[in-house]
Image: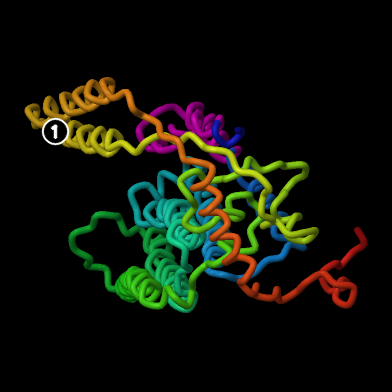
Amino acid sequence: MTIAVLSFTVWVHHFFTMGQSANVNAVFGIATMTIGIPTGVKIYDWIWTMFRGEVRFTVPMLYALAFMMTFVLGGLTGIVLAIPPLDYVFHNTLFLVAHFHNMLIPGMLYGMLAAYTYWFPKAFGFRLDERWGRIACGCWVAGFYLAFMPLYVLGASGMARRTAEILEPDFRPWLYVAGFGAFVLLAALASLFVQLWVSIRDRATTRVTASDPWDGRALEWSTSAPPPEYNFAVLPVVTRQDEFYEAKRDANPYAIPSRYDSIEVPRGSALGPAIGLAAAACCFGLVWHMWWLAVLGVAGVAGALVARSFVRDTKRVISAAEIEATERCWLTAVHEHRPIPRRLERTPTNRGIAEAVPQ
């Protein structure tokens, strides 16, 4: 909440060079620096979340660690740009471009790739190839630093962004490194497609039988993958934090319920995609002053809503017998599945390894 509130007070730091008074620059410069305090707390929260935890360096965790490191570097350079005199020097240079990408790429791309890898088995029932995932992650991280870290040096040396012709010979070595980094980033993108192809090809060997490939904590990992239309056959009972995670250590979390009830679910509808496409056409027409397309987009949105209002049969009931057959088939496969042993279990023989200090 602190970051959300402060973010509304720092936008003027983009206008330090626009000519407002020194007092205005000081106010927004201090506000920009202040936002680094809750951001630093957030970083420490993430670090302490991992501390003494069961951290496994799978692909999603590698992306998360890369995000934290890169985001911290971007934040530090943001504090530099929060000083109005320095912002006057670095304004419209490649230093600003490097800072922006330090914040944008890890904040969005690494998080998106981590989530893509983490949730893929839940959505499709098989894991992405780990080896190609590590290759892609290594290329993303290495290519990012090779492509954008030289820009800090170039920006501090006075190279403006959007430069059509480079005449300064001292800039060339750094530009060559950045260009090589761009090729590594292309290799990272290609690795993602190779990873997807290999994963689909070998999906029989990476099938998620128990739908819990990460030893997950949340309840969604207690259902099949992909999950059934009704999600949970029986409403889960939660009596403690991380109920599913603790249940896996205390008893069998996949016990077959004694009774199933019918479940009412909404029927599928094309309303969402239709409104999305019509709204996209409207926005495209507004941006490019294609008024006929904007009008058609608005009419498409309105028409989809009106057409949907005439639909009365919007729900259907899944019978208890159908739910029981589906659940028993899946639970039988789970009970026949041999789980993968964990690499470090907190047993009496290795408890001292996992616990550095007494509880």
As helix, strand or loop, the secondary structure at mark 1 comes to helix
Q: Residues within 10 Å of mark 1 (few under 14, many from 20)?
A: some
- Image quarter of residue 3: top right
In the image, is 56 to the left or to the right of 350?
A: left
Please name whichever residue, 102 or 240, is drawn nearer the observer in this view of the structure: 240
Point out the stretch of residues depicted in magenta. Answer: 5-34
| Left or right: 14, with 260 as reference point | left
Residue at the disc numbered 1: 285
Q: Using the rendered view, name the quadrant where residue 353 is placed.
A: bottom right
Dot 1 amino acid type: Gly
Q: Does residue 90 appear in this view? A: yes
Residue with the most extreme front position: 321
Quadrant assignment for the N terminus: top right
Quadrant containing the C terminus is bottom right
Question: Considering only vertical position in the picture, is 339 above or below 14?
Answer: below
Q: Looking at the image, can residue 106 be seen? A: no
Query: Viewer-proximal residue, 60 or 225?
Result: 225
Residue 301 drawn above or below residue 134: above
**Residue 267 falls left or right of residue 129:** left
Report x, y in % for residue 302. 21, 22
Say which residue appears at 56% left-offset and 30% top-offset.
5
Q: Is residue 157 magenta?
A: no
Tell me what residue is drawn at x 32 percent, y 23 percent: 312
Q: What residue is rendered at 41% in x and 55% in y?
A: 101
